[in-house]
């Protein structure tokens, strides 16, 4: 039987053994993350048909669930672990030749551990275990942001570290308060007993949890660290941070709201918060002159859209949110990877310096265009299907307020279109002063970029094979009773 | 004015939090998971120190994660400071006085012994891998401060870190292969209160002790060698 | 009991001192005192395991890390 714990244990073991491989040969170590993520990808895809029938609940150490840590590999968890493993696999191929300077061995270890932490968060069924994996994720991202060792890099890393550490301590305090009241850390057990406690007493832990996790998720008032961190990190890491790390924060918030606390009063709050984040992110992105900062602000906007979709809290809305997670991970990952080599060739992050790229790096520019169009939501790319699903779910809610909110989401898409078209126009049509020589990116960058382009187009044209999985994940995410019964029997 | 406003806001926040925390019954014996551990811990895990049975056996997966958190922190520091490593110029160092040097050298083995005692007896007496590892790291700190020409073998520390981490994961995976559960306590539990008891717990704690010791020493080593 | 109260008061004093000292070395020593008293309090609260960890990590290693960092930067807050 395939056990979901292998998704965490094997990459962890591989990450620990990278220095040992390094003693044999310094050239092997960079292939370890590729191997680990390929293993995870294959294993998660094998798990998909199994969890569609019923979620797999496994306990660690062989004790009964509330007394030990358990993993809950439901449709949501396995879907997200497929996304993490796929992005991790592609970006680790990209890193093979992109990362040349600094302590490369440590880069590969941190990279693998970051993804392991993310996988742990989406699979665990224990609130403290979630915190531990969340810390692995956060601390490795602080280090990777500062990895280039430049002044801005270290400054951004320290900024991220301070805000992130504040968030983590809020989460830890919240967990202590929850344990003080319920005497258990199992999420299903807490969810079962939550109604027996006066709502005043769970208000403080709830607020602390949302605030703490919201920092990593970069929800509007808590997103100050993100533009610096995502723009100073190496592009491969920006792709992972934008594509994976912030989504993990959103997943954790959604898990708390839907499963652990099950407070339906907060849904409208989430919708509003998501919409504000969306508008603030897109408007700030519009003003940027630095291409990576622009992409970073656009990530804030997209996170807002995901929170908005999850806040609709119908199976269709949650499915749309999960689809948007996939679509944003692929598109933004593609954009950062493509931009990485453009910046490498020009040596500048200014949008204006990208002039003439359409002739200099034709394939990479084409890939950038595909990613940008997908993010804006043009057919036939994946971004269209996911945004369409979110809007449809908002309309299906039936109340007038949701129609207005959906209109605002479309308005944000127009702003997004404006700044992405500007960049595409500069890449293709603006005359460049430099002599134009074809300098395409190396094959280790072309392969993941090409795979991402293919995925974006194929899923965009045939979204139907995913819709079934997403709908089942959406209804599973909202079904507390089934979750509790699945874990505690 | 701003200060006054900040203080007032803080006070309001404090009252709110105090209201909410005041109702939480900390420390009462109603916590059901805790009661279960106290009642069944020794029987189920074989470790007489209940804290250890919880840390290594019931919630062993968290401990694996926590060891990784420490590992990631040490690694991240190393990655950032790697670019700023000082060139080997030992001549500028002023030698410490003889009293200090001999004192450090005299104390070093005893602190090491104490640290090892803590993590080897983790399942019997208070303490364990984390505490023992920290004590061992403080012995190395003493050497760094007192005898500045001495250095640890970096490759050795790296190998210890990796091997002990790997050992933890492999012990867990063997449990998965033998009994179907990750981190299952599959070794004989022995007679409680003896050194060779509690199955995999002492082995894991020894691995943690080595790992934590090597990591914390690595952090200090990295910091000491960083450029000013 | 009275000892615990005295310790808590001392701990609070040390914590406030750590926050307001302009001389960072003194602030580090004050935070070391906070950790040390916390370790003693943990012992009184019948948590010897935590007390050990707090004493060795909080009081010894963290202080050492701070002092090394101070030695490489400047001692006084601007």
Image: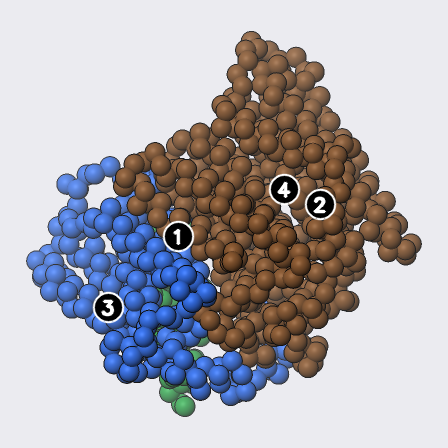
Query: Residues at marks 1 and 4, common chain?
Result: yes
Rendered green, the chain in question is C
Rendering colour (chain A)? brown
Looking at the image, do the residues carrying marks 1 and 4 touch, with CB atoms under 8 Å apart? Answer: no
Residue at (30% x, 83% y) in the render: B192
Mark 4, residue position: A329
Residue at (35% x, 36% y) in the render: A28
* Residue B97 visible, this angle: yes
Mark 1, residue position: A13
Rendering colour (chain B)? blue
Label 3, label 2: how far apart the Cα atoms are: 55 Å
Label 1, label 4: how far apart the Cα atoms are: 26 Å
Query: Residues at marks 1 and 3, common chain?
Result: no
Q: Tag 2, which secondary structure?
A: helix
Q: Nearer the viewer, mark 2 or mark 4?
A: 2
Left or right side of A77 for C41: left
Q: Give residue B220's position: percent from left, percent from top.
A: 29, 53
Q: Nearer the viewer, mark 1 or mark 3?
A: 1
**Which chain is disc 2 placed on?**
A
Looking at the image, do the residues carrying marks 3 and 4 touch, with CB atoms under 8 Å apart? Answer: no
Q: Give residue A295's position: percent from left, percent from top.
A: 63, 36
Residue at (31% x, 40% y) in the render: A22
Label 1, label 2: how far apart the Cα atoms are: 32 Å
Query: Residues at marks 3 and 2, common chain?
Result: no
Mark 3, residue position: B115
- Mark 1, other Cα within 10 Å: few <14 / some 14–19 / many ≥20: many
- In the image, is residue A227 above or below residue B207? above
Q: Tag 4, which secondary structure?
A: helix
Mark 2, residue position: A466
In the rendered structure, which disc, 1 or 4, sits on the residue that comes first in sequence?
A: 1
- Mark 3, other Cα within 10 Å: few <14 / some 14–19 / many ≥20: many
């Amino acid at each position: 039987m395939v056990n979901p714990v292998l998704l965490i244990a094997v990459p962890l073991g591989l990450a620990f053994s990278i220095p040992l491989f390094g003693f044999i040969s310094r050239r092997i170590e960079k292939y370890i993350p590729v191997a680990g993520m390929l293993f995870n990808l294959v294993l998660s895809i094998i798990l998909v048909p199994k969890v569609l029938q019923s979620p797999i609940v496994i306990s660690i150490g062989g004790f009964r669930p509330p007394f030990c840590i358990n993993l809950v590999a439901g449709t949501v968890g396995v879907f997200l672990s497929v996304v993490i493993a796929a992005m991790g696999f592609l970006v680790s191929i990209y890193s093979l030749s992109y990362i040349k300077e600094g302590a490369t061995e440590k880069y590969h270890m941190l990279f693998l551990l970051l993804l392991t932490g993310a996988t742990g968060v989406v699979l665990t069924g224990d609130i403290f275990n979630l915190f531990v994996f969340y810390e692995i994720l956060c601390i490795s991202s602080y280090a990777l942001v500062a990895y280039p060792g430049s002044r801005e890099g270290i400054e951004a890393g320290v900024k991220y570290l301070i805000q992130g550490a504040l968030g983590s301590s809020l989460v830890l305090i919240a967990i202590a308060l929850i344990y003080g009241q319920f005497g258990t850390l199992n999420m299903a057990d807490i969810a079962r007993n939550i109604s027996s406690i006066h709502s005043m007493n769970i208000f403080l832990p709830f607020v602390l949890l949302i605030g703490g996790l919201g920092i990593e998720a970069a929800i509007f008032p808590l997103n100050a660290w993100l533009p610096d961190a995502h723009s100073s990190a190496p592009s491969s890491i920006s792709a992972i941070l934008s594509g994976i790390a912030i989504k993990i924060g959103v997943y954790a918030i959604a898990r708390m709201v839907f499963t652990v606390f099950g407070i339906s009063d907060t849904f409208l709050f989430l919708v509003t918060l998501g919409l504000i984040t969306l508008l603030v992110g897109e408007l700030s992105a519009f003003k940027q002159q630095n291409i990576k900062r622009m992409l970073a602000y656009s990530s804030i906007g997209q996170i807002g859209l995901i929170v908005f979709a999850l806040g609709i809290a119908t199976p269709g809305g949650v499915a749309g949110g999960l689809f948007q997670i996939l679509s944003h991970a692929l598109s933004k990952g593609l954009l950062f990877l493509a931009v990485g080599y453009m910046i490498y060739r020009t040596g500048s992050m200014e949008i204006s310096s990208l002039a003439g790229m359409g002739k200099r790096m034709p394939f990479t520019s084409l890939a950038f265009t595909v990613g940008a169009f997908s993010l804006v939501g043009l057919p036939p790319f994946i971004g269209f299907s996911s945004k369409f699903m979110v809007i449809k779910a908002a309309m299906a809610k039936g109340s007038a307020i949701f129609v207005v909110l959906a209109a605002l989401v479309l308005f944000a898409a127009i702003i997004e279109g404006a700044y992405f078209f500007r960049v595409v126009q500069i890449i293709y049509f603006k005359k460049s002063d430099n002599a134009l020589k074809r300098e395409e990116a190396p094959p280790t960058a072309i392969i993941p970029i090409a795979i991402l382009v293919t995925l974006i187009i194929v899923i965009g044209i045939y979204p139907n094979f995913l819709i079934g999985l997403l709908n089942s994940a959406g209804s599973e995410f909202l079904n507390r009773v089934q979750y509790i019964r699945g874990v505690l029997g | 004015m701003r200060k006054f406003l900040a203080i007032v806001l803080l006070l309001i926040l404090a009252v709110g939090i105090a209201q909410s925390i005041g109702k939480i019954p900390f420390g009462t014996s109603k916590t059901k998971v805790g009661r279960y551990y106290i009642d069944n811990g020794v029987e189920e895990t074989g470790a007489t120190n209940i804290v250890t049975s919880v840390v290594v056996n019931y919630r062993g997966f968290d401990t694996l994660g926590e060891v990784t958190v420490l590992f990631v922190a040490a690694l991240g520091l190393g990655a950032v400071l790697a670019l700023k490593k000082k060139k080997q110029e030992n001549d500028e160092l002023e030698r410490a006085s003889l009293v200090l040097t001999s004192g450090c050298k005299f104390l070093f083995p005893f602190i090491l012994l104490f640290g090892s005692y803590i993590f080897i007896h983790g399942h019997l007496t208070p303490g364990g891998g984390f505490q023992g590892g920290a004590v061992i790291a403080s012995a190395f700190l003493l050497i760094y401060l007192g005898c500045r020409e001495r250095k640890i073998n970096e490759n050795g520390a790296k190998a210890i870190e990796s091997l002990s981490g790997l050992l933890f994961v492999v012990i867990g995976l063997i449990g998965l292969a033998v009994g179907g559960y990750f981190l299952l306590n599959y070794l004989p539990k022995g007679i409680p209160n003896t050194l060779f008891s509690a199955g995999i717990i002492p082995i894991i704690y020894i691995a943690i002790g080595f790992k934590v010791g090597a990591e914390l020493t690595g952090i200090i080593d990295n910091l000491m060698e960083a450029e000013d | 009991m009275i000892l615990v109260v005295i310790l808590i008061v001392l701990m609070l004093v040390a914590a406030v001192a750590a926050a307001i000292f302009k001389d960072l070395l003194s602030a580090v020593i004050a935070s070391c005192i906070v950790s040390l008293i916390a370790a003693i309090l943990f012992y009184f609260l019948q948590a010897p395991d935590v007390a050990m960890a707090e004493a060795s990590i909080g009081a010894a290693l963290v202080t050492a890390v701070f002092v090394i960092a101070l030695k490489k930067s400047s001692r006084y807050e601007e």
